[in-house]
Image: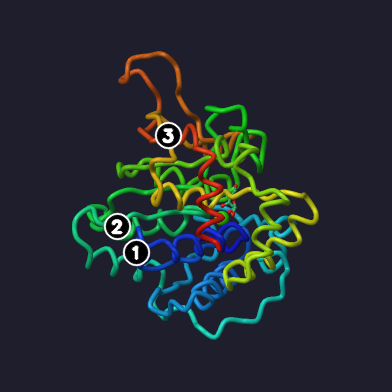
Amino acid sequence: MDGGIDDALALILALRSPEIEVAGITAVSGNVPVEQAAINALRVVELLERPDVWVAEGLARPLARDPIRAFNFHGRDGLGDSNLPQPKLRPTAKTALNAMSETLTSAKKHEVTIICTGPLTNLASLLIESPHVKSRIEEIVVMGGAYGITKYGVGNETPVAEFNIYSDPEAAKIVFEAEIRLKTVGLDVTTIPQLELVKRDYARIKKSRGKASMFATRILETNIRAHGRFTLHDPMAVAAKIRPSLYKFSDCRVTVETKGEYTTGMTVADRRDLKEDQLQGRPVMMCSDVDPGFKRFFLDRLN
Ligand code: RIB
Ligand code: CA
């Protein structure tokens, strides 16, 4: 996770969902610097009293480019400039790659799902340094990309590229080519208007006096006041694992552009009507639709 508002909401959802067990979190450079992303993850782990879940600080910059930030949207602190107290919990002393490798090595075959809600720098580095852990990964779920499968499937960082992929396209290329089952939850579905948080949803969160709701109210306030709505990119990726019945995925072959002057970071989906062996790219399960029940599910879990 890269320390944004929706990353924090996604982590609350994951930690409050008995259907999945969260082993650990790696912070990655993205919306905010990696140190801040780790602090924001620790704030959620501490809020929900889960010191058993490790938080590791990952890579401080993309594999081959300068970092880009999203301060304008998530605030300097990543959480809507909500001036929350510093967490008492500290990151694990292990590096993110060691923490992931240890968790995976002690897991059974195909037991672990890795859900990525930020740039893929940490995961790509793990796959390069410790390729043997691949056999322990059941699947990778990525909030990222824009595939043109709905009219909302256009870029948000450039006309064709989504922030997490655009931030580190070299890392994304490594993950997409890793031959591990890959599900993508892209802007095609996360920005469907009916699935976004609107003012009446915010009012419901604000009314509820739970600690998670109060935390969510604080970090969402600036955005809701400025835009009247908030896009639940990262919670939608996590919910794909918890409520798969709400999701429709279609197989597609995808290539990540890393060299285009205008198209770097684009997830190029080959949807031509050709034979399988004539298509360009690696097989991806691309989310093509999400049931409106997602928002109700998310709001219920937040309360
Ligand atoms: O494009 C949206 C994604 O970029 C989300 O994960 C958001 O948190 C930012 O990381
Ligand atoms: Ca994110």
Quarter in which the C terminus is drawn: bottom right
**As drawn, which residue projects farthest toward the bottom?**
88
Residue 7 in the image: state x and y as whole percent.
55, 59
Residue 286: image x %, image y %?
Answer: 43, 35
Bin the neighbour count of mark 1 within 10 Å (Cα to Cα): few under 14, some 14-19, many 20 and up. few
Which label lies toward us, 1 or 2? Answer: 1
Q: Secondary structure at mark 1?
A: loop
Q: CA distance from mark 2 to mark 3?
A: 22 Å
Residue topped by disc 1: 21
**Looking at the image, which residue is at 72% across and 55% down?**
73
**Residue 188 picture quarter:** top right
Query: Which label is found at residue 248?
Result: 3
Separation (CA) of disc 1 from disc 2: 10 Å
In the rendered image, which residue does mark 2 sit on? Answer: 112
Q: Give above or below for 301 relative to 241.
A: below
Tell me the element at label 3.
strand
Q: Amino acid at mark 1?
A: Glu
Q: On the image, which quarter does residue 151 sit in?
A: top right
